[in-house]
Image: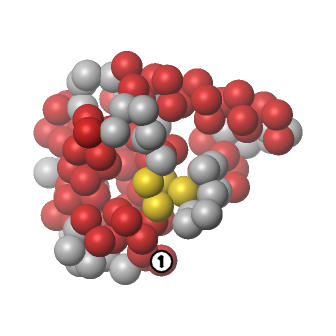
């Protein structure tokens, strides 16, 4: 079974979408909090592989990169892996600008249902 069709991927996507809907003013969520919201079904250090699948699906569907909201505890910024994969070659200022744009796009998006349908 690919991770796209893995039930855990759908659970993570649903957790992130619910978080966005409930926290428009503070979108940032930690890996640990995502893990807790999945009833610890996914250890926080193992979330990355599911987040990449979700981000790839967002890219394919023309949706904002929902996974940009997931940050390390004590940080309010995605890790370098996010930028290296989806926005390679940016300097620090460009990363901050892209991140701010991602957050605005996530706040404004009302079409997350097609992501859930895509991840079955």
Is residue 22 visible in the rendered image? The answer is yes
Q: Is residue 12 left or right of residue 52?
A: left
Residue 83 at what x, y percent from top left?
66, 46
User: Is residue 61 positioned above or below 83 on the image?
Assistant: above
Question: Which residue occupies 73% across, 37% down?
Answer: 95
Residue 38 at what x, y percent from top left?
23, 68
Q: Which residue is mark 1?
A: 45
User: Is residue 8 positioned above or below 52 on the image?
Assistant: below
Question: Which residue occupies 69% across, 55% down?
Answer: 80
Question: Which residue occupies 60% across, 42% down?
Answer: 86
Q: Is residue 12 left or right of residue 29?
A: left
Q: Report the label total.
A: 1
Nearer-the-camera pick, 34 or 88? 34
Residue 73 at what x, y percent from top left?
56, 66
User: Is residue 48 positioned above or below 81 on the image?
Assistant: below
Q: Is residue 78 left or right of residue 26?
A: right
Q: How is the image coloured?
A: secondary structure
Q: Is residue 4 left or right of residue 48?
A: left
Q: Residue furthest front?
A: 25
Nearer-the-camera pick, 96 or 57? 96
Identify the image quadrant of residue 44: bottom left
Is residue 60 visible in the rendered image? The answer is no
User: Is residue 61 positioned above or below 34 on the image?
Assistant: above
Q: Quadrant of the N terminus?
A: bottom left
Neighbourhood count class around disc 1 (C-alpha, 10 Å): few under 14, some 14–19, many 20 upward: few
Residue 26 at what x, y percent from top left?
44, 40
Question: Which residue occupies 37% across, 80% down?
Answer: 43
Assign a secondary structure to mark 1.
Answer: helix
């Amino acid at each position: 079974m690919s991770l796209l069709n893995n039930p855990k991927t759908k659970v993570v996507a649903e957790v992130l979408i619910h978080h966005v809907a409930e926290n428009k003013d503070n979108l940032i969520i930690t890996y640990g909090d995502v893990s807790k919201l999945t009833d610890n079904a996914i250890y926080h250090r193992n979330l990355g592989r599911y987040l990449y699948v979700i981000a790839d699906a967002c890219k394919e569907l023309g949706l904002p990169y929902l996974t940009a909201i997931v940050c390390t505890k004590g940080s309010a910024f995605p890790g370098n892996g996010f930028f290296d994969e989806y926005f390679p070659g940016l300097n620090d200022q460009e990363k901050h600008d892209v991140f701010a744009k991602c957050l605005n796009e996530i706040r404004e998006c009302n079409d997350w249902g097609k992501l859930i349908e895509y991840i079955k």
